[in-house]
Amino acid sequence: LKDNTKAGNYQITPSYGELKVTKGVTAAKITVDNLSKTYDKTPLVATYQVEGILSGDELQVTLDVESITTVGKASVTVIGKKVMRGGIDVTADYTFEAVPGSLEVTKRPLTVPARSNTKNYGTPTGFSGREYTVTGCKLLPGDKITQVIMTCKGYDKAAQYKEGGYPIEVK
């Protein structure tokens, strides 16, 4: 008892209580982000958001796909998780909801238009392979165009003697 209560006037018998600590389970949620980008030769790295981890606990997450670099789409799911509190594994103190996400690298837009060309009436025409330009996004360092197929619809040997315009296509 505190001072000024005249404890000497009382027969004090302490009675002890008990503090019971029960193991609780904490709900946590891991949501993998849906990410996309245009092809640029660098990896698109998977990320995720976490809810419900207690302050001081550290969550370690393992994903089935960490990143993609080339054009395509990949589903990303959580395949492992571990929660540490100091040096102690407390993963069993949690229940987890894992929401999958995706990574997508889309094609880089590149336009390769044919240059217009002229020829004299009655002379044969051939393509040297340099009758095109590159517009839109530029090729990335180390990438190159190795083959361009050019055709002229409606133009054939008989047409070389006919005036007119013929569309040049790049394939």
Image (tube, rainbow, N blue to C red):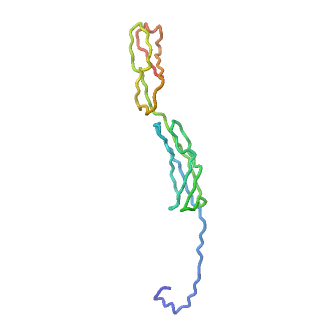
Q: Is residue 170 above or below residue 19?
A: above
Residue 20 in which image quadrant: bottom right
Q: Position of residue 120 (x, y in %)?
A: 38, 9
User: Is 6 or 60 nearer to us in this picture?
Assistant: 60
Q: In percent of the image, x 56 and y 88: which residue is there?
A: 12
How many numbered badges does the structure rendering display?
0
Q: Position of residue 99 (x, y in %)?
A: 56, 49
User: Is 7 or 84 nearer to us in this picture?
Assistant: 84
Q: In percent of the image, x 60 and y 65: which residue is there?
A: 23
Q: In percent of the image, x 43 and y 25: which residue is there?
A: 112
Q: Position of residue 84 (x, y in %)?
A: 55, 59
Q: In the current view of this chain or complex, which residue is farthest to the front?
A: 142
Horizontal side of 73 relative to 120 (left or right) equals right
Q: In percent of the image, x 51 and y 92: which residue is there?
A: 8
User: Is 108 or 147 nearer to us in this picture?
Assistant: 147
Q: In the current view of this chain or complex, which residue is farthest to the bottom?
A: 9
Q: Position of residue 26 (x, y in %)?
A: 57, 60
Q: Is residue 120 above or below residue 48?
A: above
